[in-house]
Image (cartoon, grey):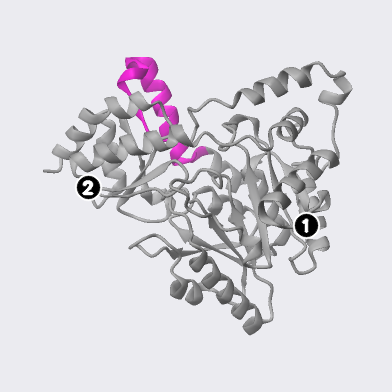
Amino acid sequence: MYNEVMYAMGVEPSVIRELFAYGVARKAEIGADKVFDFSIGNPSVPAPASVGHALEEIAQLPPAQVHAYTQAAGDPAVRTIIAENLNARFGTDYTAANLYLTCGAAASLSISLKAVLEPNEEVVVVAPFFPEYRTWIETHGATLVMVPARESDFQIDLDAMAAAITPRTKAVIINSPNNPVGVVYSRETLEGLAALLNAKQDEFGTTIFLISDEPYRELVYGGVEVPWVPSIYANTIVCYSWSKSLSLPGERVGYILVPQTLRDWEHIYFAVAGAGRALGFVCAPAIFQQVIARCIDEPADLAAYEHNRELLTSMLDELGFEYIKPQGAFYLWMRSLDPDAKAFSEQAKKHELLIVASDSFGVEGWARLGYCIAPETITNSRDAFAALKADYE
């Protein structure tokens, strides 16, 4: 009658979104100021004023220019603007022909995986990882292979990565700045990964794609470098979204970059286009394609996130929690006070603290705190965190 696999996904929603929905209901019951919701990466920083101005300008155009379909891959003029922006930033020579515009990073990743995977191939991910990677990989008939990050600093464990790659490995997904830890992979780490992947390609006579998931690229602190991955490893596909940099998560607009450095890149690009067609991800929202064209150089509002990061880390230091200080994104990775992270998350709910257990990210014993929230929520949560700490003393 229906697809049992899809049914199972539907009745078992994302742990993150389930906790977020609980928070919405709880706020309605007892008041938003009494619930301390660190569950979801939903930016509280408003979109830049330039986005509103762009929307006003676009609204004055003839309707056919605003609401009509673009090409399936996106408006060529918009893709050219994006390519020129990347070229100016990274010293590259991309054109519109390298870009496929998408409905956000989720669509970018799903399309990219569909484009390169054959049934029963393997995709390696670094744990902890964004939980939906598993959904997209398995939906496209492949197997997810987890490689634990180096726990001392959560950089990629290259020895563990080498052991995990087999002749069936078709792709490796990396996410830097990282969700959920906030680590940024160093140039040394990425160069080591590139050398490893090149060696494995030569050993097996295969192509191994590196899919770089980059929705947090602009959100870094203290001048930390986020290396441009295609300049380090030739067979890289980049997936990007403006959800975080421009605070537009609900607008679902991003891109897939298929660089000329990829082996047989033009065929890969057409496979991306075909995957977008097969999945129904054609013609990203036309209005927001035009918004991006007008706001492409708008800087991300780092000050707000940096302020929140300092508020949260100072409070956790004072209370004696262990955590990894984020280099980027807007998540903090905190050690669970209970070996069972799910039980720890449930205990936190008793104090109206909503934090995500690490199990769904592929590891045990940690929790993710999203600090893209109002600063007063962080400040006002101190007593709740103190009470949670006291529960384990």
Report the front residue among 28 and 81.
Answer: 81
What is the chief secondary structure element of the magenta stretch? Answer: helix
Please state, as top left, top right, bottom left or bottom right, where the N terminus lies in the image: top right
Q: Which residues are magenta?
A: 11-39
Q: Residue at x 66, y 25 (%)?
A: 51
Whether 344 is drawn above or below 294: the answer is below
Q: Is residue 279 visible?
A: no
Q: Which mark is residue 338?
A: none
Q: Residue at x 49, y 49 (%)?
A: 131
Residue 310 magenta: no
Residue type at tag 2: Leu
Q: Position of residue 328 (x, y in %)?
A: 46, 47
Q: Position of residue 178 (x, y in %)?
A: 48, 51
In the visual, does 226 lie left or right of 271?
left
Q: Which residue is mark 2?
A: 337
Q: Position of residue 291 (x, y in %)?
A: 72, 30
Q: Residue at x 82, y 48 (%)?
A: 96
Q: Determine crowd level at label 2: few under 14, some 14-19, many 20+ residues with C-alpha closer than 10 A.
A: many
Q: Determine crowd level at label 1: few under 14, some 14-19, many 20+ residues with C-alpha closer than 10 A.
A: few
